[in-house]
Image (spheres, grey):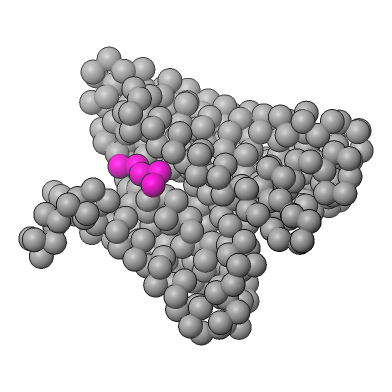
C-alpha cells in the first residue's frame, strides 16, 4: 500500500482521480459488453452531447464548491438562459450572435445575484441559491408564456451556431466539435484555479475563511468571483443544451445541477471546500455522461438513471468525508 501511495503516476494524478478514471473505463467496457451497440461511434457522440452541458455547469460550480459553498440554481438558470435567448431569437428576430451573448449574459447576471446574496448579504449558500433556482424557473416560464422554445434549426441561414458543438459532414458523419471547446474551457479554468491569485484565494476560502480574512484578503470579492464564474458557465451550459437538444421546456432544469455536483465530487473536489480539481471534474462528468447514455442500452430508463446518479454521488461524498477524517 505504501509503495502504491508513493507511485509517480498515483502522486501525479491523485488517488481519487485515478480511481475515477479507472471507474470511467470500467463502466464504458461493461456497457459495451452488455450491449455491443453501445460501443459504436454514434453512441460516443451521444456521450459527448450529454457531457457538454453537464461539463460547463461542473466547471463553474467547482469554484463554488471549492469555497465550501453550493449553487443549486445552475440547472434552472441553464434552462432559463436557453428559453429567454431562444424566445428573443424566434419571436423578436434577434441575430444569433446576440442570442448567444444574451444566453451567457443571463447566466452571469444570476451569478452576480448569487454572489451578492452570499458574499454581501451573508445568506447561507443553500438558501440563497435555492431562492434563485425558484426565481429563474419562474421567470423563464413567465417570459415565454409557459410555452416551449425551439432554437433555429441547422437548415436556417442562422443555424451556423450548431457547428460550435457538432458538425455534420456531407456523408452524414457527425463530428463532436464541442468536445474541443469543453476541454479548452477546462484547461483554461484549471490554470485559473491552480495558477492564479484568484484561484488560490478561492481555495483558501474553503480551507479556512476566517484565517484568509485575517490575512488581509478581501474574502467577499473572491466569493463573488466564484459565484459569477458558476453563473457564467451555467449560461454556457444553456447555450450547449439549446444547441444539442434544440427544444427547451419551461420549468425544466431542476435536477441538472445534481449531475454537475456529482461530477465535481466524483472527480475529487471536496464538499467541505479547500480542494478543487478541474481535471478530476472532467473525469467525473464523463462518468455521469456514460451512465446517462449507457443505462438505456441495458433497458433502464430515466428513473433508474436518477437512482444510479444518486448512488454514485453518495459514494463519492462518503469517500470525501472519509478522506477528510483521515487527515485529522
| Majority secondary structure in the magenta region | loop
Residue 277 among those drawn in magenta? yes
The reply to whether residue 45 is in sight is yes
* Residue shown at the point (42%, 62%) measured from the top left: 313
* Side (left or right) of 172 relative to 221: right
In depth, the one of 178 and 281 nearer the eye is 178
The residue lying toward the viewer, choosing from 177 and 317, is: 177
Image location (x, y in percent) of residue 113: 58, 29
Q: Quadrant of the N terminus?
A: bottom left
Left or right: residue 279 versus residue 162 is left
Residue 137, compared with residue 249, is above or below; it is: above
Q: Can you give x and y, in whole percent of width and height, for residue 171 in the image?
A: 77, 61
- Residue 76 x %, y %: 65, 47
Residue 32 in the figure: left or right of residue 313 = right
Q: Nearer the viewer, residue 126 or 21?
A: 21
Q: Which residues are magenta?
A: 275-279
Residue at image position (71%, 29%) is: 101
| Residue 255 visible in the displayed image | no
Q: Is residue 98 magenta?
A: no
Q: Quadrant of residue 237?
A: top right
Q: What residue is shown at x 41% (from left), y 65% (from top)?
A: 24
Q: Nearer the viewer, residue 210 or 105?
A: 105
Res 172 → quadrant: bottom right
Q: Position of residue 38 (x, y in %)?
A: 57, 76
The mark total stands at 0
- Vertically, is 18 above or below 222? below
In the image, taking residue 129 as reference, residue 26 lies left or right, namely left
Amino acid at each position: 500500500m505504501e509503495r502504491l501511495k508513493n507511485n509517480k503516476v498515483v502522486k501525479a494524478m491523485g488517488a481519487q482521480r485515478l480511481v475515477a478514471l479507472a471507474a470511467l473505463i470500467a463502466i464504458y467496457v461493461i456497457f459495451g459488453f452488455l450491449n455491443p451497440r453501445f460501443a459504436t461511434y454514434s453512441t460516443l457522440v451521444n456521450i459527448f452531447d450529454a457531457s457538454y452541458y453537464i461539463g460547463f455547469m461542473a466547471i463553474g460550480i467547482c469554484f463554488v464548491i471549492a469555497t465550501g459553498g453550493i449553487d443549486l440554481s445552475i440547472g434552472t438558470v441553464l434552462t432559463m438562459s436557453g428559453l429567454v435567448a431562444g424566445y428573443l431569437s424566434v419571436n423578436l428576430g434577434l441575430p444569433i450572435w446576440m442570442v448567444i451573448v444574451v444566453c451567457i449574459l443571463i447566466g452571469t447576471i444570476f451569478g452576480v445575484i448569487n454572489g451578492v446574496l452570499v458574499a454581501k448579504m451573508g445568506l447561507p449558500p443553500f438558501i440563497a441559491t435555492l431562492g434563485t433556482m425558484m426565481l429563474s424557473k419562474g421567470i423563464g416560464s413567465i417570459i415565454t408564456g409557459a410555452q416551449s422554445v425551439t432554437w433555429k434549426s441547422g437548415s436556417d441561414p442562422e443555424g451556423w451556431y450548431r457547428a460550435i458543438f457538432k458538425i455534420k459532414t456531407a456523408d452524414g458523419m457527425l463530428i463532436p466539435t464541442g468536445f474541443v471547446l469543453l476541454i479548452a474551457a477546462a484547461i483554461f479554468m484549471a490554470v485559473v484555479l491552480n495558477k492564479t491569485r484568484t484561484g488560490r484565494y478561492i481555495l483558501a476560502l474553503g480551507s479556512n475563511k476566517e484565517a484568509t480574512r485575517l490575512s488581509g484578503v478581501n474574502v467577499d470579492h473572491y466569493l463573488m468571483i466564484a459565484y459569477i464564474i458558476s453563473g457564467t458557465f451555467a449560461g454556457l451550459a444553456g447555450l450547449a443544451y439549446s444547441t444539442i437538444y434544440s427544444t427547451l421546456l419551461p420549468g425544466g432544469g431542476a435536477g441538472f445541477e445534481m449531475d454537475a455536483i456529482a461530477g465535481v465530487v466524483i472527480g475529487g473536489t471536496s464538499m467541505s471546500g479547500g480542494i478543487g480539481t478541474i481535471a478530476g471534474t472532467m473525469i467525473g462528468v464523463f462518468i455521469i455522461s456514460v451512465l446517462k447514455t449507457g443505462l438505456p442500452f441495458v433497458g433502464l430508463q430515466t428513473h433508474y438513471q436518477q437512482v444510479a446518479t444518486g448512488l454514485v454521488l453518495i459514494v463519492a461524498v462518503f469517500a470525501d468525508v472519509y478522506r477528510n477524517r483521515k487527515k485529522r
